[in-house]
Amino acid sequence: MEYGIKINKKNDIVTVERTTKESKITVKIRERENAMTNLKINTGINFLNHMIETLAFRSEFNIEVDVRTEENFLKHVVAEDTGIVIGTAFFKIFEEKTQEGIRGNGFFSAVIDEAQSMVSISVEGRPNLYFDKISDGLRQNDVEDMCSADLKNFLGGFALGMKATLHINSEFGEDSHHAWESVFRALGESIKEMFKKDEKRKNLITGVKGTIE
């Protein structure tokens, strides 16, 4: 079996496949022009599926995910590896759109009921994840059928795959579901902002060094 990451693009659909001894994850991403269709998202973790669907809706990209694992899979492995593959797919799109000129960074504040979070993203080859403020909801260990730590692993993997710096401020949120959903809503909107056209930045990244690597 061949291990590693395979990237392919056909008909505006970016497909990334990552195979390890623990999992085989396939992600397909396409920029959405119309209403979001029914997406096939199967990670084996219901709440993670919901968060990826939220990310797709807010970013205005169709994201489909298929995760194949051993019968006794570890959720933190699935979460982190899925984040890496989704981030890698977005980075492929980022590379192409940079040639046309895009902002390359974005930030947004999102709410759901009592929860509010702000996410900032900048793609310049400095993959890091920072939680600048953590609400009570994010401090809770359990969120539906997974752990908060696993969602942090997903976001860390996403930052790694996209070669992005992520800053997360979870300002408010008592309910863990609401707190995390506000984070993913804000992340999706930040990605949408990042991809906005800016012809003055053709072939440029957001940092003055001029290169990702």
Image (cartoon, rainbow, N blue to C red):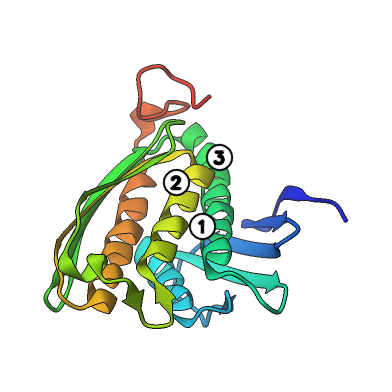
SS at mark 3? helix
Residue 125 in the figure: left or right of residue 25: left
Is the Cβ of the residue at disc 3 closer than 8 Å to that at disc 2? no
* Residue type for callout 3: Glu
Which label's residue is closer to the chain start, 3 or 2?
Answer: 3
Q: Is residue 201 above or below residue 15?
A: above
Determine the residue positioned at 39% across, 58% down: 152
- On screen, residue 100 above or below 154: above
Mark 1 or 2, nearer chain start: 1
Is residue 164 rendered to the left or right of residue 90? left
Residue marked by disc 2: 159
Residue nearest the viewer, comparing 149 with 42 = 149
Q: Position of residue 156 (x, y in %)?
A: 44, 50
**Residue 186 can be seen, yes or no:** yes
Look at mark 3 in the image and give the residue it sits on.
Answer: 96
Callout 1, which amino acid? Gly
Residue 105, percent across and down?
A: 32, 40
- Mark 2: give few (<14), some (14-19) or many (20+) Cα within 10 Å: many
Q: Secondary structure at mark 2?
A: helix
Circles 1, 2 touching at the beta carbon (< 8 Å): yes
Q: Residue at x 42, y 34 (%)?
A: 101
Q: Residue at x 14, y 79 (%)?
A: 113
Q: CA distance from mark 1 to mark 2?
A: 8 Å
- Does residue 35 appear in the picture of this structure? no
Name the image quarter holding the N terminus. Answer: bottom right
Q: Position of residue 151 (x, y in %)?
A: 41, 64
**Residue 141 quadrant:** bottom left
Q: Residues within 10 Å of mark 1 (few under 14, many from 20)?
A: many
Q: Is residue 27 left or right of residue 20?
A: left
For disc 1, the marked residue is 83
